[in-house]
Amino acid sequence: MTRKHDMPETHGTPAEGVPGAATHAEGHTGGHGERRTGQYQWWQRGIVYQVYPRSFQDSNGDGIGDLPGIITRLDHLRWLGVDAVWISPIYPSPMADFGYDVSDYTDIHPIFGTLDDFDRLIAEAHGRQLRVILDFVPNHSSDQHPWFLESSASRDNPKRDWYIWRDPGPDGGPPNNWLSNFGGPGWTFHEPTGQYYYHAFLPEQPDLNWRNEEVVQAMLDALRFWLDRGVDGFRVDVIWHLIKDDEFRDNPLNPDWEPGHNPFHAVIPVQTSDRPEVHEVIARIRRLVDEYSERVLIGEIYLPVERLVSYYGVELTGVHLPFNFQLINAPWNAEQIGAMIHDYEKALPEEGWPNWVLGNHDQHRIASRIGSAQARVAAMMLLTLRGTPTLYYGDEIGMRDVEIPVHRIRDPLEINIPGIGLGRDPERTPMQWSGVSNAGFTTGDPWLPVAEDYPEINVDTEKHEHGSILALYRALINLRQGEPALEIGRIELIPATGDLLMYTRSARIGEAGFLIALNLHDSEETRMMPAGATGVILLSTHLDREDLPVTEQITLRPNEGVIIRLDDAPPAGPRDSFFQEL
Ligand code: NOJ
């Protein structure tokens, strides 16, 4: 059985005065990510699995997944070997953006169940050594949240300043050129009070004013509510958006934008996101979370790597894991991915822990982006790179985007900006559990269509197929969890040539570790083993060669990746003859 990380016996008890240090490994990162001393937290060693709750498992036949449904599938997660489950929003919500429009931060939407179901979920997950991470949506609430109802009641309502209200511009139109990510202006006029309010997403998602101390306190209280109930951390929605320019200056126009492209990119959002002051409010969230032991903060941040790493915060007072989405838009070739890994590792602050993501509920599925054969190579990459991996539900069985007939489109983004591939329904379709009707997801009408390929692509079938991608994921997770070199070890890149990406992982300098070789193309590739290294293939993405010795050279079949256990430590000497300088 896969080894699991130690779980505390009790949850929900604030640790006494646990400082930030309690959540970091002690010690020092020697170059290449080696730590000389200290311990690692569960979220450094562990693997996160994202559940989109509407689509995971329905228990009551309404066609929408729910908490009791998730509970019945915890054994799958346990069997797969992941360590934590992040659940997209389950709070009360009018569902204008499927839960990312929260109308009560401290309750559960009846579609998903009750607080009792939630407590049961925590207990059942913890009983299986699984952590639970909630999605926290602090940038905006629903327009149906009582706070917004009060705020919009009158200009002198005590909660007026909880949201971002402005007078019309000189022409009577919006106060400035800020745009909504979901199409159109970022401002909506509120007739009864004669002012505009700002919303980075839908008009039904007004932005909260994080410059208002009462808002900060109310949000910290909401976090406390869930921390006290035993959640192990939060994934924080659009955390880099929390603070906007207090002078409300226009965003500069984007000279590279062309009509027909995503209209949001017509401006460069420097005044509406990634403002310097955002780090102060994140530090406050972090301080609260640090009052509890062993909790994690993960930030959703889409920024270039040099900006992304600032979200670790000064002296790691930011989020533990600023989501690293680089593999999502990466051109799928060895040189560029190699350069990306290199630049990311170099940019990380000392002690900043890396992480990697292949997909989520906002991105087309990996198997559709790069094809089913390369999705296996990507799985090996995700689970052998240095840093915490996050898996998106269904990727472990190779689920693909589902084409959604027009009459079944649900995503407001596709409805508002149709036809240019922004819609997110295709990657949110029901989990494929088995070959029975609706793939075992529901006995009712599923809220989004079930993929037609479910009779072949499903958990039950793949569990019994030796070469399935599910078997590969499980083998990779199992291997990773038994090997400190893979879980927490250092990484060294071998300069990429052609379509082969190669790197080594070792527990510490001078120790033999693993060579990972990934063929990112569909033709055979042969290379000399670097610097005369020899070893044994432990795992191939094809799941058909194991314990095979490798000397001198290695031949990878089309779309194959392998993990080789090296016989000896990599040679000492001029590092860059063998490794790329990190
Ligand atoms: C990011 C979430 O991942 C996405 O699904 C949502 O639509 C926006 N934030 C707005 O909350």
Image (tube, rainbow, N blue to C red):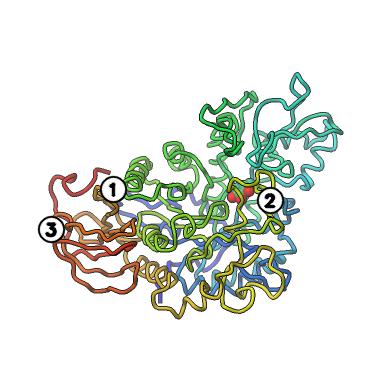
Q: Which residue is mark 3?
A: 532
Quick one: 353 or 81, which is closer to the camera?
81
Q: Residue at x 35, y 54 (%)?
A: 386
- Give the mark, 2 or 1, whose residue is nearer the N terminus: 1
Amino acid identity at mark 2: Asp
Q: Quadrant of residue 522?
A: bottom left
Quadrant location, the C terminus:
top left
Horizontal and vertical percent for residue 525? 25, 58
Label 3: state its secondary structure. helix
Q: N-terminal of the two: label 1 or label 3?
A: 1
**Front tag of 2 and 1:** 2
Quarter of the figure with residue 165: top right
Local packing at callout 2 (Cα closer than 10 Å; few below 14, some 14-19, many 20+) is some
Answer whether labels 2 and 3 touch (C-beta < 8 Å).
no
User: In the structure shown, which secondary structural element does the residue marked by tag 1 occupy?
Assistant: loop
Q: Amino acid at mark 3?
A: Gly
Residue 549 located left or right of residue 6? left
- Amino acid of disc 1: His
Q: CA distance from mark 2 to mark 1?
A: 41 Å
Left or right position of 580 against 324: left
Q: Tell me whether the residue at label 2 lies in contact with that at label 1, contact meaning CB atoms closer than 8 angstroms.
A: no
Tag on residue 97? Answer: 2
Q: Residue at x 37, y 67 (%)?
A: 476
Q: Which mark is residue 32?
A: 1
Give coordinates of residue 454: x percent, y percent: 56, 72
Q: Mark 1 and mark 3: span between their CA atoms? A: 22 Å
Q: Residue at x 47, y 57 (%)?
A: 366
Instruction: Identify whether 559 is placed above or below 221.
Output: below
Task: Choose mark 1 or mark 3, whichever is in front.
Answer: 3
Q: Ligand 1 closer than 8 Å to the CB at disc 2?
A: yes
| Residue 330 makes an appearance in the image | yes
What residue sits 70% from the left and 39% below the top?
Answer: 214
